[in-house]
Amino acid sequence: MTWQGLLDAYRDYLPFAGDIRIISLNEGNTPLIQADRLSGLIAPGAGLQLYLKYEGLNPTGSFKDRGMTAAITQAVYEGARSVICASTGNTAASAAAYAARAGLRCVVLVPEGKIALGKLAACLAYGAEVIAVEGSFDDALNLVRQIVERQPIALVNSINPWRLEGQKTGAFEICDQLGGRAPEWHCLPVGNAGNITAYWMGYRQYGRGLPRLLGAQAAGAAPIVEGRVVERPETVATAIRIGNPARWQQALQALDESDGIITAVTDAEILDCWRLLASQEGVFVEPASAAGLAALRQQIALGAIDPAGKTAVVVLTGHGLKDPGVAVEQARRPRSLPAEVEALERYLVNRE
Ligand code: AN7
């Protein structure tokens, strides 16, 4: 049977009305890639079964599509004509795409100058109205929360419960892909904390076992780790540059119930793991997506996680092409050569 998107595949686990018209781009069904080389690097000889859930292969290049198919489907069902969100970029791109498919007006608020180029390009291409807010993501989310009280426009941030309903299917897929069981550890970046909340909902509902959750925040934007709102969050991982997560309490509850860990990783650790994912496994992600791996490596090194014989899944939340700016900044410059075979041969032999 062909894959027609996750709402179709997991319909029995989702609380939609029977006659609902699904708005889908055939999202979900992303690969779970075994990463033996990385396992050997972060836990040498431990027999850690490490898997990468490559969410960057969703239709708009991030896990947000899981939640957005659900939120837009429900918004259309309820008669919405317009949708709005605040976003560090991926939610905006996803909302813009699904709104386009549904024929809705879409307004997205992004922090001025702090959104990766691939995300902005996508929002504009899908025809969203992009508003650059002079402030942070948190400021933009405050505006959105207020405007939906005044105007008939549907909010599609992860405050919207349908977003979590869609995103919880990631947990179902992981259990299915592991042959009907949950991993021992589930590692992921934490920004607004919608995804960690949704995954925990999913594992609990599916009944194939429960993992321990490992959440990763960027050191310059780690409100949950520090237990206080961060007024001016800063990190190279712009996707998770969030100082006051909307799902803070639910994240703490999920961490508590799963006997989990939440930790901060530095930009240097994030970029190091971002490089390793691409260079050791051929998996190109945006910087925020490498935070889960950085946290796992850190906790193994500290002795807080024993990797021996365990299964760990790291969720890679967004595609590398989302943030070409960071990728080019971090890379070596391409070598230029004259268009002559001798020059090419000299280079190959001498690498000069
Ligand atoms: C690649 O798009 O908040 O903890 O506005 O884009 O559920 O917020 C993005 C978040 C991780 C964090 N990885 O997930 C937005 C936005 C990537 C992301 C997260 C985001 P949450």
Image: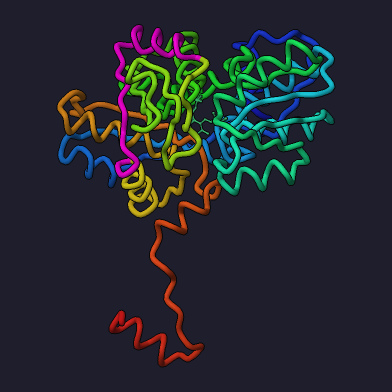
Location of the N terminus (image quadrant)? top right
Q: Is residue 351 above or below residue 296?
A: below
Asked whether residue 202 is in view, the answer is no
Q: Which of 182 and 330 is in front in this view?
A: 330
Identify the image quadrant of residue 91: top right
In x, y percent, where is residue 307?
A: 21, 29
Highlighted magenta segment, given as a residue range: 247-269
Q: Residue at x 64, y 44 (%)?
A: 120
**Is 29 left, or right, of 268 in this rendering?**
right
Q: Is residue 70 above or below residue 332?
A: above
The question of residue 260 being in magenta is answered with: yes
- Report the number of numbered marks: 0
Asked whether residue 27 is in view, the answer is yes
In x, y percent, where is residue 293?
A: 33, 36
**Is 16 left, or right, of 66 in this rendering?**
right
Q: Nearer the viewer, residue 339 or 192?
A: 192
**Is 180 left, or right, of 184 in this rendering?**
right
Identify the image quadrant of residue 97: top right
Q: Which residue is drawn at 56% across and 22% down?
A: 167
Coloration mode? rainbow
Location of the C terminus (image quadrant)? bottom left
The question of residue 71 being in magenta is answered with: no
Q: Is residue 347 above or below residue 313?
A: below
Q: Nearer the viewer, residue 273 or 11?
A: 273
Identify the image quadrant of residue 211: top left
Q: Residue at x 66, y 8 (%)?
A: 15
